[in-house]
Amino acid sequence: MKNTIRIIASVLLIAVIAASFAACGKKPAPAKDYDINAIAETIHKEVPFEDPYLALVENREFALSTYGVDPALVADENGQKACSIFVSGAYPEMIVAIKAKDEASAAKVMDSVKALIETYIKNYTTYTPEQVAKLESAVTETRGAYVFAIVSNDNSAAANCLKGLLG
Amino acid sequence: MTTPPPRTASRGFWGKELEKNEKKLHTARLVTVIVFTAVLGLVFLLLLVLPKHAGELSPLEFRSLQEFPWKTGGSNNSAQRIAEDVVTGEFSAHTDKFLEDHFPGRKFFIALNAYTMRLTGRNADQAVVRGRNGRLYDAVLRIDEEQLEKNVSRLNGFAEENGLRMAYVNVPTSALTVTEELPRLSLEYHDAEAISFIREHTGAYVPDLISLFKAQPDPGRLMYRTDHHWTMEGAYLCYCDLARELGFEAVPSSDYNAEGYDFYGSYYRKAGLWQTPPDTLEIWRSPALENAKVTVGWGSSAAVYTGVYDETKLVPGEVDRYAAYLYSNNPVTVIENPEGNGRAVMMVKDSFGNSIAPLIASAYSTVVMIDTRYFRGIEPAPSEYVSEYGITDLIVVFGTDSSVSDVFINFLR
């Protein structure tokens, strides 16, 4: 009887350990070409945002500098930087879609975006803490050389929308 | 553990003593198990039955409490989403935080820890330093000279590009000015070094608030005990100093009617010393300020108010009373005083600016407040406001924390 219990416990333990490794074994999605402008526009239309005036920053170099992103890391497309960034004037909401030059550059771009989100958390914690939950559950995704970040009024919907667009 | 000898008539006195001790040990173990299980059971029961405030704003700590772990997905709380969170570890992280935020007697245990730390002298390196007479102090701030130089340089550049006369107010932490209530053991604060650095790197007027405040009969009245901000008296002292330097006439303090409200500030929320008595936050009213037009934001999304105080923040039960000053922090706020002196000033500020701005607006006809921490890149360029309102002066009002932090000063263009 004791041996039976020991065997069952061992099997259960192995199953739990195997399950915990499941996330580690996740393979990255294969890289594709994405239309970042179309993706950002779709997210803007489909995902709920608290700010009805969420707007695209037309000056792309300026948009990158506001996110602390080195423009040298970002690919060029049709004579301008390959990025589509929507920002809010009143809330920390954002849609960020950037095509970096390569995967290594994409990792650095994502670091800058995440650092900015951390700064927003610090700024908003003291004065409008109800915005902090949005920032803490921000959607961030890197696919090959592409970097995406969304802070919205429903980040779960944002994550699903992005997943659907990226395939 | 050795096996006792068999219970025979020959065990004698020591054998009987051993038997008695074994019984006591057995009873003690049983009691321990019962009490331990009962406490765990009680905590679990209380966790189940006590009302939850998941996702709500905690009035004590002024932050949102953790949502139920199965409801953190916004519009997607499906079984599939929850299962994914279990695999990635998000579910257990949310559960940990939920249990922390809803642990029975949480407020009591936080206070127990805070008062124990204070009584045992473990104080100097905490996030909030507990001083004497109920005063709380900020932790020591590390001065990032590189960031400070970037901020000062951009401010200098902006003033020069727009032909503005500049004053730079760096408000030091209360540990520099209310020194008699510091605990016996405290670390050294570096705000004075930051102020010296600013003075060396700008041609702007930099008021010496440390000397000014310490020279007052009661410096404790100039900074809140439970908050990092200055009081209206502290802001007024600085306002008079700026008036002398920038050449505008300061409105006498007797022209204002002061109203007091109980106020628990940022230090109180972090300290856990719930028995600390409240501060008194003062609202200084005057007919000019009551009639001032305040525009928050720009373009079609702008909100327009009459009067510089948000009365909704002064009602009983309101947590963040400091937000009554000029409707909290916003990227752009314009105050227009029809009874002003005809001059216009720009204030690049953090929250310290909110309480001094009404005083400055008592004198100036237009005050344009810029808080670059909340700029996102779609706002009008601050230089456009300089042209639009004929601004001649620039007053920077930062706490030391903002002076040495990345406050997105590059938006000042």
Image (spheres, coloured by chain):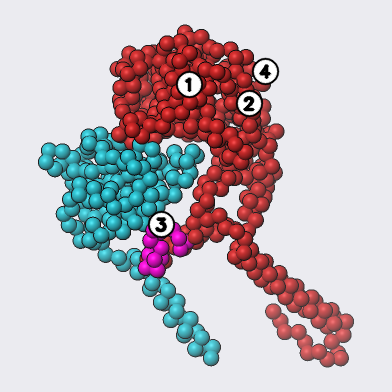
Q: Alpha carbon of mark 4 to alpha carbon of mark 1: how far?
A: 33 Å
Same chain for mark 3 and mark 2? The answer is yes
- Say which of B10 and B32 sits in front: B32
Q: Which chain is cyan?
A: A
Give the residue pinned by disc 2: B259
In primary-sequence order, the first of circles 4 and 2 is: 4
Q: Chain of mark 4?
A: B
CA gap, disc 4 to disc 3? 54 Å
Which chain comes out red in the rendered image?
B
Residue B191 point in image, percent of width and height:
51, 27
Q: Is residue B138 visible?
A: no
Q: Are marks 3 and 1 on the same chain?
A: yes
Q: Amino acid at mark 4?
A: Pro
Residue A111, numbered circle: none
Q: Amino acid at mark 3?
A: Gly
Name the front one of labels 4 and 2: 2
Q: Magenta stretch containing residue B74, yes or no?
A: yes
List the residue tagged with mark 3.
B74
Q: What chain does mark 3 sit on?
A: B
**Residue ID at (48%, 32%):** B327
On residue B217, which mark appears? 4
User: Which residues are drawn in magenta?
Assistant: B69-82
Q: Earlier in the sequence, mark 4 or mark 3?
A: 3
Instruction: Locate residue B193 relative to residue A115 in the image: left or right.
Output: right
CA separation, marks 4 and 2?
Answer: 22 Å
